Image (cartoon, rainbow, N blue to C red):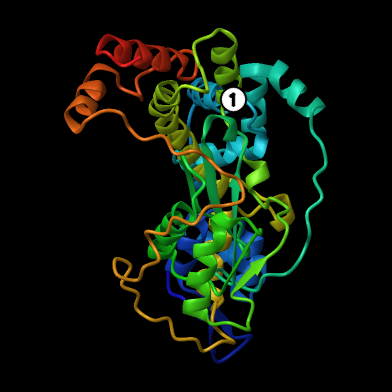
Amino acid sequence: MDPHIMVSQERGKNGRPRILISEDSVSQLLTLGLPVTCIARLLGVSKFTIHRRMVEWGLSVKATYSNIADAELDSLVATIHTSNPNAGYRMMMGLLRAQGHRVQWDRVRSSMHRVDTASIVSRMSQLGCVVRRTYSVPSPKSLMHIDTNHKLIRYNIVIFGGIDGFSRKIMYLGVSNNNLASTTLSFFHEAVQKFGFPLRVRGDHGGENVDVACLMFSVRGTGRSSFIAELSDCGGMCSLRLPPTSHVLHQLEEDGHLDLSSSLHIFCCHYAFIPRLQVHLNIFRDGWDNHPLSSEGNLSPHQLWQLGQQYHSEECDENLQIPQIDWESSGLIPSDTNSGIQVPEIECPLSSEELNELKAAVDPMQPSGNFGADVYIATLQYMHSIGYM
């Protein structure tokens, strides 16, 4: 998309001048899923002008919606609901959009009620109000929030996330078996490689953020709040709804199949559940980035990010030069800085050859009817069969 969409005028001999708008620009904005009123504001013309040009060009908002049949929509919703049982209307719309289906509100609501009304009623009865701080972030990459989710810390599983403060688009979301600063930096590095350096980063006082703070001070400088250490209000991480993994793990403990004092059991737990969790996080990320935000005129984080990239400059008021960083020799990646929350690292007890044999015998991503519990049991049984107790 042209970052400088121009609207010009054509003057004739009589009457008011005709407003000229790029057909490609309007078509691309429609493809992004923006409503006509939003497009009109972006181009500085009335919505009636946009409507007239769309008629001239044969464009319509209706054509941007999926023509998927109700039966197929119900099947998709049921599949999504299985792995995301707590998804509401907006999140369901985002998850459908992530799969390439832009569906109207009323169709999504009707489908969800047809698939499982009981779950909707149950979820609505459990809804609470979460009050977060409100503030203004001028553009994409002006401020990134980073945080960790410790809901599964009991099993040495930690989830790391970063969110753009302007659009609320997820910059990174990953799971690991440790809570080290080097792991946070690794995820942050991936985000930087994909989206570029933020002007500032905000995180809590946890030691897992130390390496990111050092990097931001090195790149952006000190004395300008390059890294803002505050108590976390959890940003988007508290909106993260995990599959029933915690319940499954607790049940395995109660049934005597999972002993947290056994490094072998923890290894099997990580082997079976971490890849499955990462897939779920990827799906959540795509759904989140495409779900409409009520506070932003029902624009999604992805739409806000795209518009912000085109119409705002994240460094408009700061002429900072970002140095080229040799990540391998910078000394930043291999840090072993510990956080305040200690997570014992469990080393893989298998040789490379044995690990390949395990992967051939038990695929951690094989279909599971109980969210990976059967995969864990199969992994543990295999390890016992080759002499690991």
Mark 1, other Cα within 10 Å: few <14 / some 14–19 / many ≥20: some
- Residue that badge 1 annotates: 246
- Given residues 342 and 34, the one toward you in this image is 342
Counting from the top left corner in percent of width and height, residue 322 is at 43, 81
Mark 1: secondary structure: helix
Q: At x 41% / y 61%, what residue is drawn?
A: 189
Counting from the top left corner in percent of width and height, residue 178 is at 48, 43
Q: At x 53% / y 40%, what residue is drawn?
A: 343
Q: Is residue 111 left or right of residue 75?
A: right
- The answer to whether residue 88 is visible is yes
When asked about the image quadrant of residue 273, the answer is: top left
Counting from the top left corner in percent of width and height, residue 120 is at 72, 24
Amino acid at dot 1:
Ser
Q: At x 44% / y 86%, what residue is drawn?
A: 321
- Given residues 185 and 337, the one toward you in this image is 337
Extreme residue in the left direction? 353
Q: Quadrant of the N terminus?
A: bottom left
Extreme residue in the bottom direction? 13
Q: Is residue 97 above or below residue 335?
A: above
- The answer to whether residue 5 is visible is no
Counting from the top left corner in percent of width and height, residue 173 is at 50, 47
